[in-house]
Amino acid sequence: MIRSTLLWISENDWCKNTLPRYGFVRRAVRRFMPGETLEDALQAARAMADGHGISALITFLGENVADRAEAREVSRHYVHTAEAIAASGLDVELSIKPTHLGLDLGLDVAEENIRRLTEAATARGNWVWLDMEYSRYVDATLDLYRAIRADHPRFGICLQSYLHRTPADLESLIPLGPAIRLVKGAYAEPPDIALPVKADVDQAFFDQAVRMLAPDAREAGVRVGLATHDAAMIRRVNRWAEANGVGRDAYEYQMLYGIADGDQRRLAREGRGVRVLISYGAHWFPWYVRRLAERPANIGFVLRSLLPR
């Protein structure tokens, strides 16, 4: 009930336009993003790298852009971001949303904009990760991925374990030797599209993680990013990997800024790969509410942050 309500709020136009104006909402989001500017994101990335040896991903928040000029400007912003990362010397990769770069305007618009920023990142030895959004975008997103990755191997894709189609999509991608970020899934989807029961989603995530770490996938060169804060899942994957001779360098955990900080640092101390997604930008409200829906335990923190001090 809480999750479905939060997902409804994340999609409601009135909520998206009105609630971010309130100071208490802006205060509550501070845990999950260090600020609204690229400089804020890079400063946070440097603090994690210097203090804990943790790498980062950064994403400029936004989605469903309906204006060609705006989508082009987002692409140019990411070109500037790639340049700034290279100048910083930090291990920071880029994460992008296809609808932020014009997918709603057409596959050709999104491809042109994504190619522009991917070329800039690749020229500087960096990686770009293509996020997955609602299920209605999956086919187009995979088409974009395959087209651009043919020219830019440092280009990763996100798969959502709760979608019924994901095992087949995963099998089709493995022969390419891609970089895959596996997430559980945070969008509201009907039960004929996505698994409705949390235990089933957890099992699907584990099964797909194991598939990505299978001998043929490793031989193909699959880069594995497991995006979860689920401590039980992390222990389960680690136990399976150790029992099956899969080294710690075969996969990394990708986690969100401000969530499970202690686990992030512990995993890094254990010599495991950890990469934290840092978000920035003015259009943070839908993203923020989906993060609460993903992990309702965060609501307690938010409520405490709103109490008078």
Image: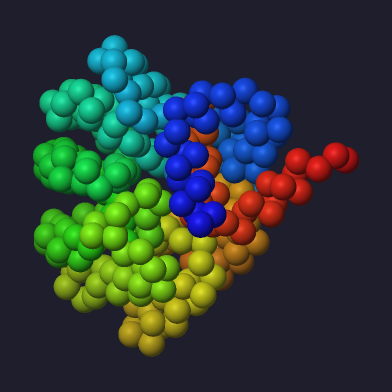
In the rendered picture of this protein, how many numbered marks are placed on residues? 0
Percent across and percent down for residue 55 are 50, 49
In the rendered structure, the answer to whether residue 93 lies left or right of residue 125 reads: right
Image point 35% across, 64% down: which residue?
196
Q: Residue at x 44, y 82 (%)?
A: 239
Q: In this view, which residue lies farthest toward the right?
A: 309
Q: Nearer the viewer, residue 94 or 153?
A: 94
Estimate the x, y position of residue 122 in percent, counting from the top left. 27, 36
In-front residue for pair 302/189: 189
Q: Position of residue 273 (x, y in %)?
A: 46, 61
- Tell me the residue at 16%/26% (across/down): 106
Figure check: 157 above or below 252:
above
> Image quarter for residue 77?
top left
Please give left or right for residue 273 compared with residue 174 in the image. right
Report x, y in % for residue 6.
51, 46
Residue drawn at (49%, 39%) of the image:
9
| In the depicted structure, whether residue 69 falls above or below residue 273 | above
159 horizontally vs 152: left or right = right
Depth check, front residue: 181 or 22: 22
